[in-house]
């Protein structure tokens, strides 16, 4: 079992600049990644893995600007671009979970806040970072999604809804940017043992967890460009590996494979 990664339920994905002042960073040639939610949990593991792989990492954490605050995010991204001169990778890891009660018992404010952080936050970061990527000929965006977005659930419904919507953000980013070199991916991290997941009733008694290393291996593979065939699609830690995904890409992906698409009859007008 992996060690618990410190990630509180109330981490609202705030970001604060922690600049890399290495003289060889960014403008010196090393690729630059921006990772939100990077002070704890999966985001922290991703940031550390990227740094170990030679990336310059600009970390978002939970002390200054919420990912739903457009003005604050704009200022932060502008600072990153000014400091580093480039952004090659964005990992949207910041996210929250609503109360584990059914939809009819949920609190509207808590419910909507979850959707805002998980969807609006990733949208705003994508919207702010994409122009710099496009000006440089392209870049890659990895959205931390969840299998919860692929099915309905009575409890924590805002989380489910937000992850379904995030898949559409990923798909729309892919369609808008593919021809200009922009790639976007959904990464389902499986069930990594964090402070958040460890306290969830849905995972009470769980003894098998997805390791952080399985998640970071996929992030590094996506960041490298070797899995660009999966742009607009999802990959899943704990099931997929870089090697298995490379083999799948070589085989060729079917239309709609690993996408959030309705299955329609051939005679349906929407088909």
Image: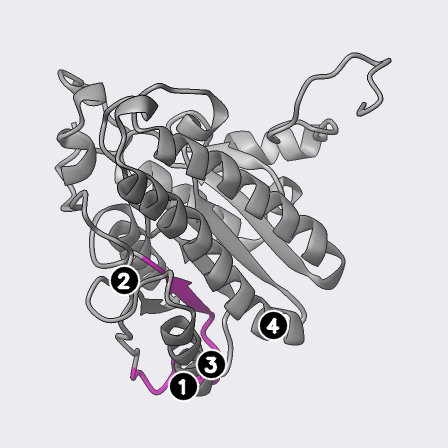
How crowded pointer 2 is (Cα within 10 Å; few <14, some 14-19, many 20+) is rated as many
Q: Reading the chain from its start, which is encountered first: label 2 or label 1?
A: 2
How crowded pointer 4 is (Cα within 10 Å; few <14, some 14-19, many 20+) is rated as some
Numbered label attached to residue 224: none
x 40%, y 80%: residue? 75
x 50%, y 56%: residue? 123
Q: Does 112 sit above or below residue 86?
A: above
Q: How many marks?
A: 4
Task: Point out residue 216 in the picture as x, y percentages from the top left corner.
Answer: 36, 45
Q: Reading the chain from its start, which is encountered first: label 4 or label 1?
A: 1
Q: Reading the chain from its start, which is encountered first: label 3 or label 4?
A: 3
Magenta stretch in the rendered image: 21-36
Task: Point out residue 4 in the picture as x, y percentages from the top left corner.
Answer: 13, 38
Q: Which of pointers 4 and 1 indicates the residue nearer the eye?
A: 4
Callouts 3 and 1 close, C-beta under 8 Å: yes
The residue to which callout 4 is attached is 131
The residue to which callout 1 is attached is 83
Label 4 element class: helix
């Amino acid at each position: 079992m992996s060690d618990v990664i410190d990630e509180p339920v109330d981490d609202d994905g705030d970001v604060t600049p922690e600049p890399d002042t290495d003289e060889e960073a960014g403008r010196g040639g090393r690729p630059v990644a921006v990772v939100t939610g990077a002070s704890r949990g999966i985001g922290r593991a991703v940031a550390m893995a990227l740094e170990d792989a030679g990336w310059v990492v600009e970390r978002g954490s939970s002390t200054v600007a919420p990912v739903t605050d457009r003005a604050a995010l704009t200022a932060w991204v502008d600072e990153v671009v000014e400091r580093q001169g480039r952004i090659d990778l964005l990992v949207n890891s910041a996210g929250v979970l609503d109360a584990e009660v059914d939809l009819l018992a949920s609190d509207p404010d808590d419910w909507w806040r979850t959707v805002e952080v998980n969807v609006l936050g990733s949208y705003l970061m994508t919207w702010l970072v994409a122009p710099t990527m496009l000006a440089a000929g392209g870049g890659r965006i990895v959205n931390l999604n969840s299998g919860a977005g692929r099915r309905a659930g009575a409890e924590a419904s805002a989380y489910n809804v937000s992850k379904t919507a995030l898949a559409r953000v990923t798909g729309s980013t892919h369609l808008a940017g593919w021809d200009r070199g922009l790639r976007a991916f959904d990464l389902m991290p499986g069930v990594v043992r964090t402070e958040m997941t460890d306290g969830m009733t849905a995972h009470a008694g769980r003894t098998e967890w997805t390791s952080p290393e399985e998640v970071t291996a996929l992030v590094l593979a996506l960041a490298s460009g070797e899995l660009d065939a999966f742009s607009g699609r999802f990959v899943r830690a704990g099931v997929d590996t870089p090697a298995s995904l490379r083999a799948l890409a070589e085989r060729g992906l079917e239309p709609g494979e690993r996408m959030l698409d309705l299955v329609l009859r051939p005679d349906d007008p929407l088909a």
